[in-house]
C-alpha cells in the first residue's frame, strides 16, 4: 500500500513538472558540461574553387552532433540560405527587406539587444514577412568566456526582450557572436533547443567605413556560390544592400532557390 501511495505521489510530481516546464530545466541541470572542451575556437572558412563547399573550422559531420551547421551538407539541391547579422541599424535593413520581398526570398536575421531595443518595428516586419529572426545574444559576448549559467542568461534574456518588444517569439536558431565557440558552448545551446548557425560564404563587410563595394560583393558570390551555402552578411553594409538584388537575380538564373534555415532539419 505504501509503495502505491509513493508511486502515485511521484507520478503526480512528474506530471506537474511536465506541465510547468520543469522537466527541461532538470534535464539541463543533469548534463555534465565539464565533459565538453571549452577551448575557444573562432569560425573560419577555406574557400574552394569550382563552386565546391568551403572548408571550415570544424567538419560538417562533427557539427551535426550538436545540431550545428555551416552549410547544408545533406542537400544536393541548388539551395542557398541567406543569414544577416544585425548588431545595430545603419539605415539599410528596410531596403534589404524590400529586395527580399521583391524576390520572394525568406532569410534569417540574427539580432542582439541593441538592435531589438532600437528597432522593434523592423523586427516585427521581419516576422510578418515570413523571415526567421534568430538569437545573436543580448550583449554579443564571446560565449566560451561565459559560464553555463552566463550563456543561458545571454540567450534567454534576448528571448524575453524580443517577446516584450514585438509580441513574437524568437526562432530557435543562434549564431555565436564573433563566430567564437567551443564544444561546451555548442552542447549548452543544443540542450537549450537551439540550432547553431555558422557560414560558408563571408567577406569583409562589417565595417561601414571600409565597404568593399557593390561590384566586389556581386563578383564574390559569382565565384564562391555553392549548393547548401549559408551566408554571413551584415545588415549594416551599404555594399550588401546595393548588391543583393543583382546577386539574387544571378543565382536565380543559375537555378538556385533560397530557403529558410528551418529546412536544414528536414
Image (cartoon, rainbow, N blue to C red):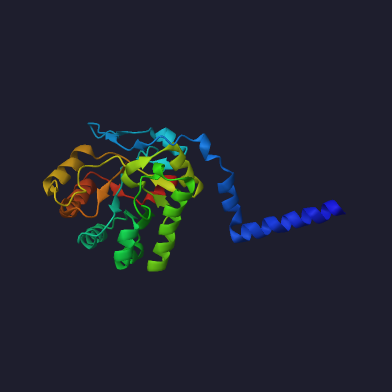
- Front-most of 101 and 216? 216
In the displayed orientation, state which residue is furthest to the right: 1
Tell me which corner region of the image, top left, top right, bottom left or bottom right, holds residue 125. Answer: bottom left
Tell me the quadrant of the picture where the N terminus can be found: bottom right
Question: Where residue 195 sits: x, y (%)?
Answer: 43, 47
Residue at 51 percent across and 46 percent down: it is 191
Q: Which residue is drawn at 24% across and 55% down?
A: 235
Is residue 257 shown left or right of residue 262?
Answer: left
Taking the image as drawn, is residue 213 in sight? yes
Q: Position of residue 69 (x, y in %)?
A: 39, 41
Above or below: residue 6 compared with residue 120:
above
Q: Quadrant of residue 216?
A: top left
Q: In this view, does 161 lie to the left or right of 239?
A: right
| Number of numbered discs | 0
The reply to whether residue 167 is in sight is no
Image location of residue 180, percent across then percent down: 35, 41
Above or below for 63 versus 12:
above
Residue 236 at x, y = what percent?
21, 55
Task: Say above or below: 57 vs 240.
Answer: above
Amino acid at each position: 500500500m505504501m509503495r502505491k501511495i509513493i508511486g502515485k505521489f511521484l507520478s503526480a510530481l512528474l506530471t506537474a513538472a511536465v506541465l510547468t516546464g520543469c522537466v527541461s530545466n532538470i534535464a539541463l541541470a543533469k548534463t555534465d558540461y565539464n565533459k565538453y572542451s571549452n577551448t575557444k575556437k573562432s569560425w573560419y572558412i577555406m574557400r574552394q574553387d569550382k563552386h565546391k563547399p568551403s572548408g571550415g573550422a570544424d567538419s560538417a559531420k562533427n557539427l551535426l552532433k550538436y545540431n550545428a551547421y555551416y552549410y547544408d551538407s545533406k542537400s544536393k539541391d541548388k539551395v542557398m540560405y541567406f543569414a544577416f547579422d544585425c548588431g545595430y541599424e545603419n539605415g539599410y535593413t528596410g531596403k534589404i527587406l524590400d529586395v527580399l520581398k521583391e524576390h520572394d526570398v525568406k532569410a534569417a536575421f540574427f539580432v542582439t539587444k541593441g538592435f531589438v531595443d532600437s528597432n522593434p518595428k523592423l523586427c516585427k516586419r521581419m516576422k510578418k514577412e515570413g523571415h526567421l529572426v534568430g538569437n545573436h545574444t543580448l550583449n554579443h559576448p564571446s560565449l566560451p568566456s561565459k559560464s553555463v549559467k552566463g550563456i543561458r542568461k545571454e540567450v534567454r534574456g534576448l528571448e524575453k526582450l524580443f517577446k516584450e518588444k514585438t509580441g513574437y517569439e524568437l526562432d530557435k536558431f543562434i549564431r555565436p557572436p564573433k563566430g567564437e565557440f567551443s564544444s561546451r558552448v555548442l552542447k549548452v545551446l543544443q540542450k537549450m533547443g537551439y540550432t547553431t548557425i555558422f557560414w560558408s560564404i563571408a567577406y569583409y563587410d562589417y565595417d561601414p567605413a571600409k565597404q568593399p563595394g557593390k561590384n566586389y560583393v556581386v563578383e564574390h558570390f559569382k565565384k564562391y556560390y555553392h549548393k547548401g551555402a549559408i551566408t554571413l552578411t551584415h545588415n549594416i553594409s551599404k555594399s550588401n544592400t546595393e548588391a543583393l538584388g543583382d546577386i539574387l537575380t544571378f543565382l536565380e538564373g543559375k537555378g538556385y532557390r533560397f530557403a529558410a534555415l528551418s529546412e536544414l532539419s528536414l
